[in-house]
Amino acid sequence: VGHNAIGAGRVFDQGAKLVAQAIADGKMFAGKGWNEIVGNSLAKSSTLHFIGLFSDGNVHSHLDHLKAMIVEAKKRGVKKVAIHALIDGRDVGETSALEYTEPFEAWLATVDPNYGIASGGGRMFITMDRYDADWSMVERGWKTHVLAEGRTFPSASAAVKAFRAEKPGVIDQDLPAFVVERGGKPFAPIVDGDSVVFFNFRGDRSIELSKAFVGEVPFERKKVDVCFAGMMTYDGDTNLPPRILVEPPVIDRVLSEYLIGAGVRQLAVSETQKYGHVTYFWNGNRSGYLDQGQECYIEVPSDRVSFDERPWMKAAEATDALINELTKRPYGFARINYPNGDMVGHTGVFEAARIGVECVDLVLSRLLPVIKKLNGVALITADHGNADEMYEIDKKGGVKMENGKPKAKTSHTLNPVPFIIYDPACAGSYELRTDITKPGLANVAATALDLMGYAAPEGYEPSLIRWK
């Protein structure tokens, strides 16, 4: 997660790498969490369920992890396994679902006839909400996965094909919910005594469903008595979920802690869609304030619409909040995330993404004069690309075409991101270093401290500037 690196000044092994390693060296399957999950299913002759993002995008999950767990469950003698597939189309191709469901269903049939996909739906329609933005998504997911309520199909692939035929142009992340039936009834609702694994490794879109199984949520539901585990800890402060399969990285000595120790008051602002990025991820996967006496967090509620419909999002309101705070009381450090390029980019709608990026340009033209008036410095960057490539690129470097039209790209890109220092009072007193061969997000923290007159903590990636 890019904001982990920015906020910690270092790059830590993230979920994907940690999970793959735990599977490869056997630690996952020797661990307490996995053995409790499997032991519960064996003792009660119950179903083992896997819920998660159904792709190899490696941002929230990876199908290789799921396959490894299914193979191990078979070895251990689990009689019935059910997969609840959250269709991607965001971290992978926007209409790539059948590239995953069809071979997976064929492979699963060779593993055990009692193993199968039980339910699913588009990741932006059910289950994978984040930052409490739209709990109705989680409620729809609960009804689909747990209660097996919804439209039924003979397979996940059949559901995808039917939805596409009924609504040409629909992209995978927005597909409706579906339930797979066998013998005229739902294949595998989640019932008392079952075991459930949420196999996403990333926390932001895993917290709310985990709360539905082991905590309290803002919608009515009949609780089920299951043995639940997350792939990793999704919220370290609340120990959510209590049972995990892989230990998360320990991210210590973050920038915010350093500034608190130095007595620097901090401000963090964003709308709901990225609020957790400037707080939770920035602070090393810790919820809430580190020191409320020296920190102020402001969340601007996001619109609950598809962001191509309102690509300006809440950029203006977030900027208003930031400027109001900066001019009202002294802050030594502030951060703001504008989600437009990412969230609108994910829709695959080029014109909307262009408007979203133009809106960020517009609000920066309001914000930077305020920074100048306050004798401040602004560092402008991004944690990854998205709107920079709105069309798929073919092997020759050209735009990939589909049905005579450019094929939309909805996933993140791996392109380098800009890093801009806005410092009206610089007067040539420092310069960008050219000896850092691979500058990255982890260098930002030390650069900010350098500009503020502080030495970066030991182990931080070096500053990108050199004083003359």
Image (spheres, rainbow, N blue to C red):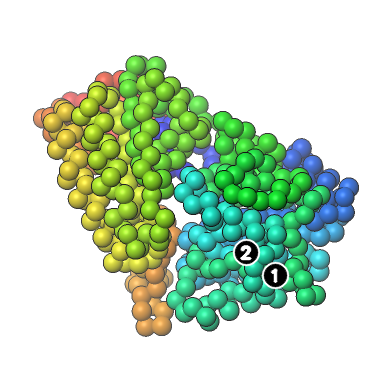
Classify 139 as above or below 235: below
Decide which of 468, 408 is in the foreground and name it.
408
Q: Are marks 1 and 2 in contact (CB under 8 Å)?
A: yes
At label 2, counting other C-alpha atoms closer than 10 Å, the crowd grade (few under 14, some 14-19, many 20 or more) is many
x, y percentage for residue 252? Answer: 50, 26
Is residue 462 in sight in this rendering?
A: no
Say which element carries label 2: strand
Decide which of 278, 393 is in the foreground and name it.
278
x, y percentage for residue 251? Answer: 51, 31
**Residue at numbered disc 1:** 180
Q: Amino acid at mark 2?
A: Gly
Figure quadrant of the C terminus: top left
x, y percentage for residue 239? Answer: 62, 33
Instruction: Determine the residue located farthest toward the left in the rendered image.
Output: 427
Please tell me which of labels 1 and 2 falls first in the chain.
Answer: 2
Classify 126 as above or below 179: above
Instruction: Return the mark for residue 368.
Output: none
Is residue 354 in sight in this rendering?
A: yes
**Residue at numbered disc 2:** 120
In the image: residue 250, left or right of residue 2: right
